[in-house]
Image (tube, rainbow, N blue to C red):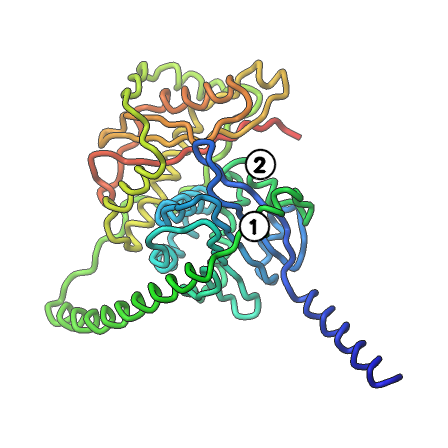
């Protein structure tokens, strides 16, 4: 064999090995709120699959990627939506075990994401490390083999943002060409990367200074024998909620629903624009701790189970084979009474959209928030999927 031929063959062989080792695009999903495109999510894996179980294999390198479509998106709002999905798609013992890691993950997000930004969450199967980067710049990592699947279940678990979102990610590589075209065109500008580099450098300097101060405070607390903070007063074994029942309401649940007091009408007020809500969130949120994150996640799971218990699949929709997902933003007061309902995402069928809102109204009053989350009002998102058996 000629030297040039041998060299070419080696290059082809090396390229083949590299391609085999690189995770492949398994699926894409478009996230929308209030009829506005927010971002495109992607799942990469060495093993292409239509099964969530296959993609949750911890022996396989995988990557989650988010590319921003909105001109500007609150990083905290994006993170909170993801954490709500984590709360309802992971069992209570997993949430308890991952609470500290969730603090690490949550604190990586600040400011605003811009159009073209690429957020990457990569899992290394050999080390079990999950690494987070924005536009190629490392934000941080979590050294826990179980953590990546905790994040992934929020997208492909039993209660995803919508059924279309989940199906888009479980496409086994068969993605929409138009969505793929939009996805591939999204990239950050050189100015954006320079801006982030400067911001991350400043954040690292602040973190170093805070760590030094923290050591001094810790020493002072040890000397004063400060007692440890109490853990959330919620059982850590709350299971993920089930979807709305198919085939009609079970008799026992129907009776309980009929005995509920007539719900009060939601307060009439101008729905805030998404940008206004995000700014309010950024101003009002207290510093996160493991106790607060765990309390919030378990309480959210409780609120959804309470809602699903009062959700009915309209009989006519079943007869016509109508399926779909509805997502609602709900505001309750300190006593659990519903104050406001906003439709974030609708299905194609008015009967399903109407039933989703009525399920929220029937569920009022909701269980009161735990002590860690006590405030004048509490906001949460409810995804309801109406799906007929296969």
Residue 338 shows in this picture: no
Instruction: State which quarter of the image contains the N terminus.
Output: bottom right
Few, some or many residues within 10 Å of mark 1 (<14, 14–19, 20+): many
Which residue of the protein is positioned furthest toward the right in this rendering?
1
Q: Closer to the camera, 313 or 71?
A: 71
Quadrant where the C terminus is found in the figure = top right
Count of picture labels: 2
Q: Position of residue 92 (x, y in %)?
A: 41, 47
The residues tagged by marks 2 and 1 sit, at their Cα atoms, a distance apart of: 13 Å
- Residue 37: percent from the left, percent from the top? 48, 39
Where does residue 135 sit, x and y in percent of width and height? 47, 60
Question: Dot 2, how many residues are within 10 Å of its Cα: few (below 14), some (14-19), or many (20+)?
Answer: some
- The local secondary structure at tag 2 comes to helix
Circle 1 SS class:
strand
Q: Nearer the viewer, residue 295 or 384?
A: 384
Q: Is residue 381 left or right of residue 209?
A: right
Q: Work out whether mark 2 precedes mark 1 in sequence or the reverse, and give the earlier one.
A: 1
Occupied quadrant, residue 255? top left
- Identify whether 282 is placed above or below 318: below
Disc marking residue 42: 1
Looking at the rendering, which quadrant does residue 371 occupy? top left
* Residue marked by disc 2: 164
Vertical placement of 234 versus 229: above or below? above
In the image, what residue occupies the spot 43% across and 32% down?
34
On screen, residue 227 above or below 9: above
Write the residue at 25% across / 42% down.
373
Using residue 276 as the reference point, say whether residue 39 is left or right of it. Answer: right
- The residue depicted at 40 percent of the width and 28 percent of the height is 307
Residue 86: % across, % down: 44, 47
């Amino acid at each position: 064999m000629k030297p040039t031929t041998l060299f070419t063959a080696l290059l082809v062989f090396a390229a083949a090995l590299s391609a085999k080792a690189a995770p492949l695009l398994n699926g894409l999903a478009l996230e929308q709120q209030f009829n506005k495109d927010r971002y495109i999510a992607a799942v990469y894996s060495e093993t292409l699959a239509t099964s969530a179980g296959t993609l949750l294999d911890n022996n396989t390198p995988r990557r989650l990627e988010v590319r921003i479509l909105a001109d500007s998106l609150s990083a905290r709002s994006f993170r909170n939506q993801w954490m709500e999905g984590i709360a309802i798609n992971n069992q209570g013992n997993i949430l308890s075990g991952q609470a500290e890691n969730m603090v690490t993950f949550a604190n990586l997000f600040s400011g605003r994401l811009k159009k073209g930004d690429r957020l990457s969450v990569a899992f290394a199967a050999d080390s079990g490390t999950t690494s987070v980067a924005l536009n190629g710049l490392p934000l941080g990592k979590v050294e826990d083999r179980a953590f990546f699947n905790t994040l992934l279940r929020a997208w492909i678990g039993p209660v995803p943002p919508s059924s279309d979102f989940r199906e888009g990610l479980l496409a086994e590589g068969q993605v929409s060409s138009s969505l793929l075209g939009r996805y591939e065109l999204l990239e950050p500008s050189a100015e954006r990367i320079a801006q982030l580099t400067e911001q991350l450098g400043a954040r690292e300097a602040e973190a170093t200074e805070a760590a030094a101060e923290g050591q001094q405070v810790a020493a002072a607390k040890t000397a004063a024998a400060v007692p440890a903070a109490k853990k959330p007063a919620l059982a850590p074994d709350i299971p993920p909620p089930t979807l709305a029942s198919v085939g009609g309401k079970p008799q026992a649940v129907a009776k309980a629903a009929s005995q509920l007091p007539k719900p009060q009408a939601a307060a009439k007020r101008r729905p805030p624009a998404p940008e206004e809500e995000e700014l309010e969130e950024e101003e009002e949120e207290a510093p996160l701790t493991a106790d607060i994150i765990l309390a919030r996640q378990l309480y959210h799971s409780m609120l959804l189970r309470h809602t699903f218990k009062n959700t009915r699949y309209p009989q006519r929709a079943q007869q016509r084979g109508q399926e779909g997902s509805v997502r609602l933003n709900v505001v309750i007061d300190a006593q659990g009474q519903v104050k406001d309902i906003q439709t974030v995402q609708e299905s194609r069928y008015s009967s399903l959209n109407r039933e989703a809102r009525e399920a929220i109204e029937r569920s009022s009053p909701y269980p009161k928030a735990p002590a860690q989350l006590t405030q004048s009002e509490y906001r949460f998102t409810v995804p309801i999927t109406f799906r007929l058996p296969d």
